């Protein structure tokens, strides 16, 4: 039985990005500002499909830079069921789900997955004030299947494995199987995490506190870059805002 737990990222963070809505047609023609320069961009739209469903761009489309497809971090991560956090001071993006904590640092080809490094062939970057992640690196880090159709410029991401059911054989002299009784599912009382307090800055006293509705049964620590720590609380659920 898989225990429910809540993962918390403890660090001093500033979350927020500029937002605007633009309609995108079959051809994307726009100005891209990154690495301190303006770049004229004119290319056929890149279509992103997740489990066969087309993702509609919200405020930034997928773009191809240096032959690699970059997607807006916040939208693609949320579409994949992940939590997203941005650390303005460290210029780091965090993508978190029940299994992984991914750390991407802008303009660096090295990322972190549960504290262990992995390498990308193209680094994430800030484009038009949006954090853009290389789609292949993100999918690979999340253990997802990804395919690229060059003719239609379509990125297809599959979050579930394809399995082919087998047809059971009929026994020669079948016997009536004994139907097992359904076991009673034990009730679980989850502790609610009510509040997280973090230091106001890096120069302040580095004390973190987590308030819960009861005793926490167990937790695990995962260290990531820049002296940051991730805590996995077991038997806990999110109650803070």
Image (cartoon, helix red, strand yellow):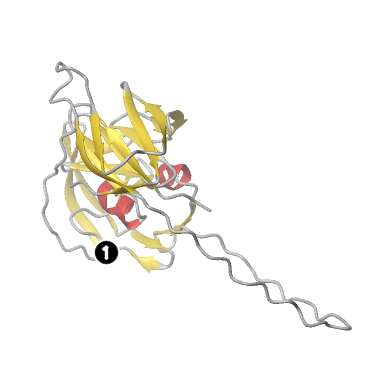
Is residue 160 left or right of 211 when viewed as pictured?
A: right
x 12%, y 51%: residue:
19
**Residue 3 location in percent, x, y?**
46, 49
x 69%, y 76%: residue:
179
**Residue 152 location in percent, x, y?**
41, 64
Looking at this view, name the residue that lies furthest to the right.
172
- Residue 156 lies, with reference to residue 35, above or below; the image says below
Asked whether residue 65 appears in the rendered view, the answer is no
Q: Secondary structure at mark 1?
A: loop
- Residue 88 lies, with reference to residue 169, above or below; the image says above
Is residue 239 left or right of 100 when viewed as pictured?
A: left
x 18%, y 47%: residue:
241
> In this orientation, which residue lies closer to the viewer: 25 or 78?
78
Is residue 11 left or right of 145 when viewed as pictured?
A: left
Label 1 Cα neighbours within 10 Å, binned few <14 / some 14-19 / many ≥20:
some
**Residue 133 location in percent, x, y?**
32, 43
Disc 1 designates what residue?
56
> In this orientation, which residue lies closer to the viewer: 20 or 195?
195
The quadrant in which residue 56 appears is bottom left
> Number of marks in the image?
1
> In this orientation, which residue lies closer to the viewer: 40 or 134?
134
x 42%, y 29%: residue:
115
- Residue 11 lies, with reference to residue 8, above or below; the image says above
> In this orientation, which residue lies closer to the viewer: 162 or 110?
162
The quadrant in which residue 206 appears is top left
Asked whether residue 129 appears in the rendered view, the answer is yes
Is residue 203 left or right of 84 when viewed as pictured?
A: left
- Residue 155 lies, with reference to residue 130, above or below; the image says below
């Amino acid at each position: 039985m898989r225990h429910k737990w809540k993962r918390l990222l403890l660090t001093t963070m500033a979350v927020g990005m500029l937002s605007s809505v633009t309609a995108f047609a079959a051809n994307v023609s726009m100005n891209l500002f990154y690495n301190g320069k303006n770049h004229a961009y004119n290319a056929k739209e890149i279509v992103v499909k997740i489990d066969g469903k087309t993702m509609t761009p919200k405020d930034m489309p997928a773009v191809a830079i240096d032959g690699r497809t970059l997607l807006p971090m916040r939208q693609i991560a949320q579409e994949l069921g992940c939590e997203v956090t941005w650390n303005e001071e460290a210029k780091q993006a965090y993508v978190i789900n029940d299994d992984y904590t991914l750390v991407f640092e802008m303009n660096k080809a090295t990322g972190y997955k549960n504290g262990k490094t992995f390498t990308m062939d193209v680094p994430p970057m800030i484009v038009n004030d949006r954090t853009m992640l290389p789609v292949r690196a993100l999918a690979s880090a999340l253990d997802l299947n990804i395919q690229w159709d060059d003719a239609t410029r379509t990125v297809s991401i599959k979050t579930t494995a394809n399995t082919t059911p087998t047809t059971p054989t009929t026994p020669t002299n079948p016997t009536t199987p004994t139907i097992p009784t359904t076991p009673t599912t034990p009730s679980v009382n989850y502790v609610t995490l009510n509040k997280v307090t973090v230091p106001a800055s890096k120069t302040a006293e580095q004390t973190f506190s987590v308030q819960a509705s009861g005793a926490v049964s167990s937790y695990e620590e995962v260290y990531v870059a820049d002296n940051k720590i991730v805590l996995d609380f077991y038997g806990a659920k999110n109650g803070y805002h």
